Image (cartoon, helix red, strand yellow):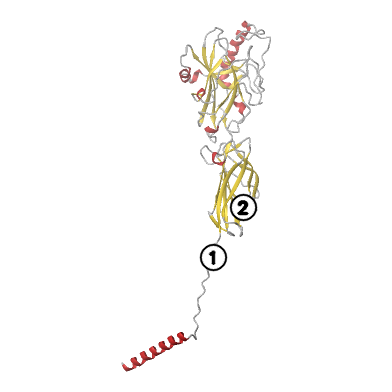
């Protein structure tokens, strides 16, 4: 979005064509006093999940109405601390700030800052800042608790911001983000198009914090942060696998396929379409679904013919590191009796919902429009053992009669010998 600067206001910091310096000084002192009473008005630390609205990270945001807080309201979530001067190492100075030094902020806008073009964010300031042109380092902090169900690696917070005078670094849990590609100069002004940065590194379970390190030269410092209206988590990954129950199947034989869809991310995964169309030579006869880890099978949970299902939901894991929702489809298949021997490959395709879901690295990768998995079988021809026919021996052949006569003579001689020996 483009920021609009009033043309009747000078660009030099600390001067306004519409606000007298004395009145401004009185207002700052009064607002600073009001801010000191605002500590009790600050809300408890928010818990961020993948379903949280991104606007929760914005400055001057009214969570109750979804809009922006008015001038002079107490900022409920962001805090501020001065590091003092001179500061030779701002990062060390940040780590040395005692907890009690963090104070509430006031929703405050002054010329020549650009007016906020957002309907749900506003400038915030610590006020109480002397008008002397003296260099000071300040820190704006936002703290939150990460929902246990969210894998820290899935968090991606996109912020656009303006600052008075300049942001020199952004820290996530004390780690400078300028070291990560793409390198983005965190510096910004108070009347130019905002700088945008997506924070994806160094998140952790439990308590987290974002800190803007700001260099200011006096008068008053301010910060306007707008969390872009995108999901606060990266698209969740869905993984798909496929296996066959046998590597070789006879022509005319039967076997089964096993297809498994698994949510690998921190938010619900949606598969818009799941299809399995077999190649020529294979017939899919029936399928049945079983669910695990909080997932639910489609209704009905079984059917006949090829697989063609829509709008399958896979819930995230109950806690980071646990397995996510899973659907398993068992397909009963057969090989046609006249199928040509050889390798037959069957591929299942899952179409992820483009706004929330992407394919896992092994299923096609984040840029793929179809998550795929394949399984192959080798069709073989059954081997039929040959039938052995015995060769008949003619009973009346001359040589057969001769052999038979010899056997009878031998048997008779043996019986005579046996009687003589008695």
User: Is residue 422 visible to us here?
Assistant: no
Total of numbered circles in the picture? 2
On screen, residue 306 versus residue 88, left or right, reads: right
- Across and down, in percent, residue 159 comes to 59, 24
Residue 357 percent across, percent down from the top left: 60, 37
The disc, 1 or 2, on the residue closer to the chain's N-terminal end is 2
Residue drawn where x is 55% and y is 31% of the image: 155
Q: Position of residue 223 (x, y in %)?
A: 59, 18
Element type at marker 2?
Answer: strand
Please, which residue is most extreme toward the left here? 421
Q: Residue at the spot x=41%, y=88% of the render? A: 406
Marks 1 and 2 sit apart, C-alpha to C-alpha, by: 32 Å
Q: Nearer the viewer, residue 148 or 178?
A: 178
User: Hey, which quadrant is residue 326 in on the image?
Assistant: top right
User: In this picture, is 156 found above or below 123?
Assistant: below
247 with respect to 273 (left or right) = left
- Res 234 label: none
Residue 54, position as x, y percentages in the image: 61, 28
Q: Dot 1 corresponds to which residue?
A: 384
Q: Could you tell me which secondary element the residue under label 1 belongs to?
A: loop
Q: Farthest residue toward the front?
A: 398
Q: Nearer the viewer, residue 304 or 294?
A: 304
Q: Is residue 361 among what the camera can see? A: yes
Mark 2 Cα shell of 10 Å, populated few (<14), some (14-19), many (≥20): many
Residue linked to disc 2: 287
Q: Quadrant of residue 56?
A: top right
Contact check, label 1 and label 2, Cβ < 8 Å: no
Locate the N terminus and report the quarter of the image it occupies.
top right
Q: Quadrant of the C terminus?
A: bottom left
Q: Nearer the viewer, mark 1 or mark 2?
A: 1
């Amino acid at each position: 979005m483009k920021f609009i600067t009033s043309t009747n206001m000078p660009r030099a910091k600390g001067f306004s064509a519409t606000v007298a310096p004395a009145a401004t000084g009185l207002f700052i002192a009064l607002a600073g006093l009001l801010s000191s009473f605002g500590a009790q008005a600050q809300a408890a630390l928010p818990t961020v999940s993948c379903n949280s609205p991104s606007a929760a990270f914005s400055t001057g945001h009214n969570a109750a109405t979804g809009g922006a807080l008015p001038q002079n309201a107490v900022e409920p979530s962001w805090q501020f601390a001065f590091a003092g001067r001179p500061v030779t190492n701002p990062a060390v100075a940040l780590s040395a700030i005692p907890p009690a030094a963090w104070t509430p902020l006031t929703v405050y806008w002054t010329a020549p800052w650009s007016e906020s073009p957002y309907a749900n964010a506003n400038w915030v300031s610590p006020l109480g800042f002397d008008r002397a042109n003296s260099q000071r380092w300040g820190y704006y902090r936002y703290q939150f608790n990460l929902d246990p169900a969210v894998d820290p690696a899935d968090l991606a917070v996109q912020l656009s911001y303006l600052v008075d005078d300049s942001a020199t670094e952004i820290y996530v849990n004390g780690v400078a983000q300028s070291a990560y590609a793409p390198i983005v100069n965190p510096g910004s002004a108070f009347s130019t198009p905002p700088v945008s940065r997506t924070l994806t590194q160094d998140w952790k379970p439990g308590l987290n914090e974002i800190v803007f390190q700001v260099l200011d030269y006096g008068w008053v410092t301010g910060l306007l942060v707008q969390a872009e209206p995108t999901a606060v988590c990266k698209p969740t990954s869905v993984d798909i696998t496929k296996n066959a129950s046998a590597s070789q199947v006879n022509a005319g034989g039967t076997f089964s396929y096993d297809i498994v869809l698994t949510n690998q991310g921190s938010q619900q995964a949606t598969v818009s379409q799941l299809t399995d169309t077999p190649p020529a030579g294979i017939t899919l006869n029936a399928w049945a679904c079983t669910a695990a880890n909080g997932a639910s099978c489609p209704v009905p949970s079984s059917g006949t013919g090829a697989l063609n299902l829509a709008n399958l939901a896979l819930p995230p894991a109950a806690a980071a590191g646990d397995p996510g929702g899973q659907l398993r489809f068992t397909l009963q298949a057969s090989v046609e009796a006249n199928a040509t021997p050889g390798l037959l490959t069957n591929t299942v395709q899952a179409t992820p919902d483009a706004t929330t879901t992407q394919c896992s690295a092994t299923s096609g990768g984040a840029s793929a429009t179809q998550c795929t998995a394949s399984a192959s079988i080798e069709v073989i021809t059954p081997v039929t053992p040959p039938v052995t026919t015995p060769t008949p021996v003619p009973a009346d052949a001359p040589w057969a009669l001769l052999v038979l006569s010899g056997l009878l003579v031998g048997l008779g001689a043996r019986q005579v010998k046996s009687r003589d020996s008695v």
